[in-house]
Amino acid sequence: MIRSTLCYIERDGCYLMLYRNKKKNDPNAGKWVGIGGKFEPGESAEECLLREVREETGYTLTSYTFLGVVEFRNDAWEDEDMYLYLADGYREAGESRAAVDGDTVSRTDAPGCDEGDLRWIPKDEILNLNLWAGDRYFLEPMLRGETDLNMRLTYSGDTLISAERRSRCP
């Protein structure tokens, strides 16, 4: 079982999105995704989140919310449980304060990443991107402000077979 984190960093009505176009043999090639990756041995979800965001963006998160676990089941790949987060505060490398609200966002001021191109995308344009079909099932409610996003997405290869919302355990 793979365990991973995925984070959408929000700023001025935009999410920082990663267009996967640089990594060889990337199952996400050509797709837009959030920021994240696999747990390292002994890591908690929070430790993985913070490390992955720092490695892929250079940002240190200062404010973030856990939204739920998205279970990916697939007949072609190993099962994965992905811990989903939304962040609204961060520091850039060498910056001692959180990013200031009200900064003007451009599509070209995103940090560099060796896995693909990072871009600030307006939230109302996110669903027009080339996304995994299953990502829409957590992005749509996330964009509406929902926070209980536990679900199971079942794929056969690259094809989404089913999507079901799940209740959080009491």
Image (cartoon, helix red, strand yellow):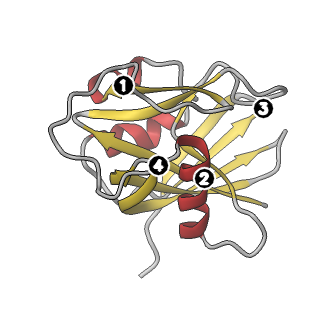
- Looking at this view, name the residue that lies furthest to the front: 94
**Residue 62 numbered tag:** none
Mark 3 and mark 2 residues within 8 Å of each other at the beta carbon: no
Q: Could you say which quadrant of the image residue 115 lies in?
A: top right
| Between discs 3 and 1, the one toward the N terminus | 1
Q: Could you say which quadrant of the image residue 138 lies in?
A: top left
**Residue 121 numbered tag:** 1
| Between discs 3 and 4, the one toward the N terminus | 4
Residue 67 visible within the image: yes
Question: Given this view, does label 1 or label 2 mark the residue nearer the observer?
Answer: 2
Q: Position of residue 12 (x, y in %)?
A: 22, 35
Q: Which residue type carries mark 4?
A: Ala
Q: Which residue is mark 3?
A: 157
Q: Which residue type carries mark 1?
A: Ile
| Between discs 3 and 2, the one toward the N terminus | 2
| Between discs 4 and 2, the one toward the N terminus | 2
Position of residue 170 relative to residue 138, above or below, is: below
Question: Given this view, does label 4 or label 1 mark the residue nearer the observer?
Answer: 4
Which residue corresponds to the image point at 55% horizontal and 59% vertical from the top-left?
A: 49
**Residue 93 numbered tag:** 4
Residue 87 visible within the image: no
Q: Position of residue 5 (x, y in %)?
A: 58, 55
| Between discs 1 and 2, the one toward the N terminus | 2
**13 on left or right of 127:** left
Q: Which residue type carries mark 3?
A: Gly
Q: Which residue type carries mark 2?
A: Glu
Distance in Å between CA atoms under marks 3 and 2: 26 Å
User: Judging from the image, what secondary structure is the residue with disc 2 in?
Assistant: helix
Q: Position of residue 158 (x, y in %)?
A: 72, 28
**Residue 52 numbered tag:** 2
